[in-house]
Image (cartoon, coloured by chain):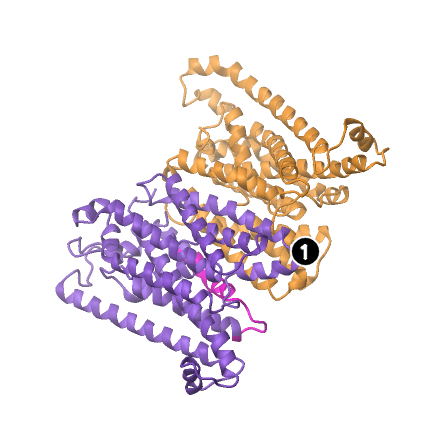
Chain colours: A orange, B purple
């Protein structure tokens, strides 16, 4: 179920399904299971909201410095001047960054998986992050850009171009985009782009400081100003994702079926890809390349609510936000008084998930 | 989707006598006009193999000589030979004896090691893309070496040993996770990619934490560089290449048999499991030793095998020796180019990356079109 999620028929929600009966189940069973299915997304919604709330509380309460409840309250209201309260005040924008970046990554992964109908699609594995990084590094080196606003545009162009290249290479030949083909295309492209990054960076040692933060995802630089800068892009991505959720459901039935259901296939694909790339490039500009969140979260959410994109996309946002916030807290707690960057934590949590997906399914058939 | 056999050129080139003469390489019709595995064809293939091997050996020798002779100052062969003989030549004794000779020797041995390891891996897994660097085996060795250099402040033999142990451990984990027995196919590649993603995130993190002075060093090492070559590394890597490379060459015949499939190999009298284990260990150890000495010089392991296979054409040999020579030629040539062709000297790994990455993409496009990449 999980690994085949994007390939499985969506929940019986489209009108034609209701008319023709659910193809996979006998009609009687389908009707009797309906209330259960309608309840599951709400349960999942509650669960993920609770998780996210817990993650936010943890993120504000735990860190390099242990703070008391009073200090937390002081910090939140901005009254206290003790170190603890100041630490709390610093953690709030960072937490907000984690929530926003995690939500964007979760949605981005869910969109890419639905679009490529491929269970291992993830901005990190597909090399989209590396594309954004290369574009930013090149722009730092040659155009001397320095503001987040400029990073954003450059990262967006790099991510979009890489996504197109990787998807084109990965979908050549018989069988379309199999996981292995797509992963190899992503890794090969990443390797190629990394070689270029090295070639650009090595003769410019003075730029290394800036660059190092581009190599590993970190939320340490999150600020309200940065969030305000990226907000329009994320809103745009969210709006696009909302408009394509229903057509994506139909697309999951296959291209011909979707055309029959009145979906404009090309436009849907384009909008979904744009939303996915914008979300992931924005996150990369904000926090650097963070891998595996987009891979894990949609799988987990799909286990909870099934493959209906109208639930999957918003819940993936919630789940991604909770996951990234927890990962950030974990990174801060395990290496006191320093911190482990959140990108490292997600890689260590996520790689086993990728391995489990690879082991659990007959890869060639995916 | 694709056939489990993954009939890439490796299988085609390794088809042994007795297999169907219609075993086609790429898209040729069933009535292949080229001679099959007849006695005459066999002689011709052997001649071509020997020609290519000899030509590659000559090329490597020439590149090696150029690397020793050429630098900011030309030294005459007579001076260089005098240095090698241990006599004191003003200027040349240091420039050649202490800088160029170890660099050239290290490049040579690392190239041999990468080339041979890559070819063995590709043949054993029957996938042209499955070289050690791409499926993530060297990522463990890299991580260990960066850790040893940046955090522990180690150098020399201890770094090599740690890299070796971690490289072997990584390979073992990938092998076990992919399910022993089914070492071919996509699962192993996906798992390798996952594992190497973990290690590369650690590497990035270590770079982030390291002091700014050691970061440039670590980055140069990570892209694969002969710049820090010294005499201390030469005997270690040289010994490893002699012992492990010798083992691989000795097992070359069995590798050919193994690439035809387990059952065929058993039928030909090969102890499949034992052979595969020895091959795997030697391959990984070779790659790890070379990675520890020079850093992960990108794509050499990947490039050497397919290019050699294309030069030699169809043959029943494992192509280990010519692939090793090809690896050495790539490393030496790329290092020469990196030192002299660019406005700032680039590490060898950046040059091989710039050459190798497009080749990898082209190869991927070609294999995908044929439906044989995985």
Is residue A272 in view? Answer: no
Where residue A267 appears, as percent x and y from the top left, is: 55, 41
Toward the front, the furthest residue is: B87
Q: Position of residue B193 (x, y in %)?
A: 46, 46
Residue situated in front as seen by the camera: A340 or A249: A340
Question: Residue A106 lies in what quarter of the image?
Answer: top right
Residue B349 painted magenta: yes
The residue tagged 1 is: A210
Q: Which chain's residue wears label 1? A: A
Residue A84 location, quadrant: top right
Q: Position of residue B183 (x, y in %)?
A: 33, 44
Q: Residue at x 67, y 46 (%)?
A: A286
Q: Nearer the viewer, residue A119 or B162?
A: B162
Q: Quadrant of the N terminus of chain B?
A: top left
Q: Few, some or many C-alpha atoms within 10 Å of disc 1 (few <14, some 14-19, many ≥20)?
A: few
Most distant residue in the left direction? B39
Tell me, yes or no, if residue B238 can be seen here. yes
Is residue A208 placed above or below A252 in the rendered structure? below
Question: Magenta segment, which residues?
Answer: B340-363
Looking at the image, which residue is at 55% across and 19% down? A40
Question: Is residue A244 placed above or below B344 in the rendered structure?
Answer: above
Q: Report whether A341 appears left or right of A10.
A: right
Q: Residue A275 at what x, y percent from top left? A: 60, 41
Position of B240 with respect to A106 (left or right) is: left
Left or right placement of residue A165 versus residue B36 in this view: right
Q: Is residue B310 magenta?
A: no
């Amino acid at each position: 179920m999980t690994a085949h999620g994007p390939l499985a028929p969506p929940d019986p929600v489209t009108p034609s399904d209701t008319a023709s009966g659910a193809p996979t189940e006998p009609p009687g069973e389908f009707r009797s299971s309906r209330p259960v299915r309608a309840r599951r997304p709400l349960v999942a919604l509650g669960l993920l909201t609770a998780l996210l709330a817990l993650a936010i509380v943890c993120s504000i309460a735990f860190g390099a410095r242990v703070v008391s409840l009073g200090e937390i309250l002081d910090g939140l209201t901005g009254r206290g001047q003790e170190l603890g309260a100041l630490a709390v005040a610093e953690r709030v924008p960072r937490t907000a960054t984690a929530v926003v970046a995690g939500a964007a990554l979760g949605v981005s992964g869910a969109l890419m998986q639905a679009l490529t109908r491929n269970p291992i699609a993830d901005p990190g594995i597909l090399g989209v992050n590396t594309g954004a990084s290369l574009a930013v590094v090149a722009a730092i080196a040659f155009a001397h850009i320095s503001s987040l606003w400029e990073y954003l545009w450059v990262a967006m162009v790099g991510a979009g171009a890489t996504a197109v290249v990787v998807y084109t290479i990965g979908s050549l030949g018989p069988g379309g985009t199999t996981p292995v083909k797509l992963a190899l295309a992503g890794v090969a492209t990443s390797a190629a782009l990394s070689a270029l990054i090295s070639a650009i960076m090595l003769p410019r040692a003075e730029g290394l400081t800036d660059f190092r933060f581009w190599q590993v995802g970190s939320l340490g630089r999150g600020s309200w100003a940065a969030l305000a800068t990226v907000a329009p892009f994320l809103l745009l991505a969210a709006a696009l994702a909302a408009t394509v959720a229903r057509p994506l459901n139909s697309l999951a039935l296959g291209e011909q079926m979707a055309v029959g259901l009145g979906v404009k296939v090309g436009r849907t694909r384009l909008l979904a890809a744009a939303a996915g790339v914008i979300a992931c490039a924005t996150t990369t500009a904000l926090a650097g390349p963070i891998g595996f969140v987009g891979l894990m979260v949609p799988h987990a959410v799909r286990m909870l609510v099934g493959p209906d994109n109208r639930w999957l996309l918003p819940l993936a946002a919630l789940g991604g936000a909770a996951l990234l916030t927890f990962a950030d807290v974990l990174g801060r707690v395990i290496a006191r008084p320093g911190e482990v960057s959140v990108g490292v934590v997600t890689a260590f949590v996520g790689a086993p998930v990728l391995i489990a997906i690879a082991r659990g399914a007959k890869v060639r058939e995916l | 989707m694709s056939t489990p056999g993954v009939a890439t050129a490796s299988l085609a080139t390794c088809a042994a006598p007795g297999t169907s003469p219609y075993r086609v390489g790429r898209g040729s019709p069933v009535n292949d006009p080229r001679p099959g595995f007849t006695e005459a064809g066999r002689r011709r293939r052997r001649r071509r193999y020997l020609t290519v091997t000899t030509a590659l050996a000559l090329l490597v020798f020439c590149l090696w000589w150029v690397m020793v002779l050429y630098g900011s100052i030309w030294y005459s062969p007579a001076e260089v030979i005098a240095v090698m003989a241990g006599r004191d030549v003003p200027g040349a004794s240091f420039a050649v004896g202490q800088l160029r000779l170890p660099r050239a020797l290290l490049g040579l041995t690392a190239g041999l090691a990468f080339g041979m390891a890559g070819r063995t891996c590709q043949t054993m897994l029957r996938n042209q893309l499955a070289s050690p660097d791409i499926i993530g085996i060297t990522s463990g060795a890299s991580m260990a070496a960066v850790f040893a250099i940046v955090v522990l402040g180690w150098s020399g033999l201890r770094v090599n040993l740690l890299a070796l142990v971690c490289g072997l451990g990584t390979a073992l984990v990938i092998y076990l996770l992919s399910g022993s027995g089914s070492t071919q196919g996509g699962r192993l590649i996906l798992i390798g990619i996952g594992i190497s993603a973990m290690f590369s995130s650690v590497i990035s993190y270590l770079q982030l934490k390291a002091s700014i002075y050691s970061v440039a060093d670590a980055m140069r090492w990570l892209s694969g560089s002969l710049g820090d070559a010294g005499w201390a590394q030469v005997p270690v890597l040289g010994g490893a290449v002699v012992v492990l490379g010798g083992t691989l060459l000795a097992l070359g015949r069995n590798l050919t048999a193994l690439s035809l499939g387990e059952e065929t190999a058993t039928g030909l009298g090969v102890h499949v499991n034992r052979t595969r284990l020895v091959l795997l260990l030697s391959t990984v150890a070779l790659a790890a030793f070379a990675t520890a000495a020079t850093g992960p010089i990108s794509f050499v392991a990947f490039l050497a095998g397919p290019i050699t296979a294309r030069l030699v054409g169809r043959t029943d040999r494992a192509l280990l020796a010519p692939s090793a020579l090809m690896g050495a030629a790539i490393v030496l040539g790329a290092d020469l180019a990196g030192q002299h062709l660019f406005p700032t000297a680039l590490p060898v790994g950046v040059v091989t990356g710039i050459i190798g990455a497009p080749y990898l993409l082209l190869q991927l496009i070609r294999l995908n079109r044929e439906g044989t990449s995985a």
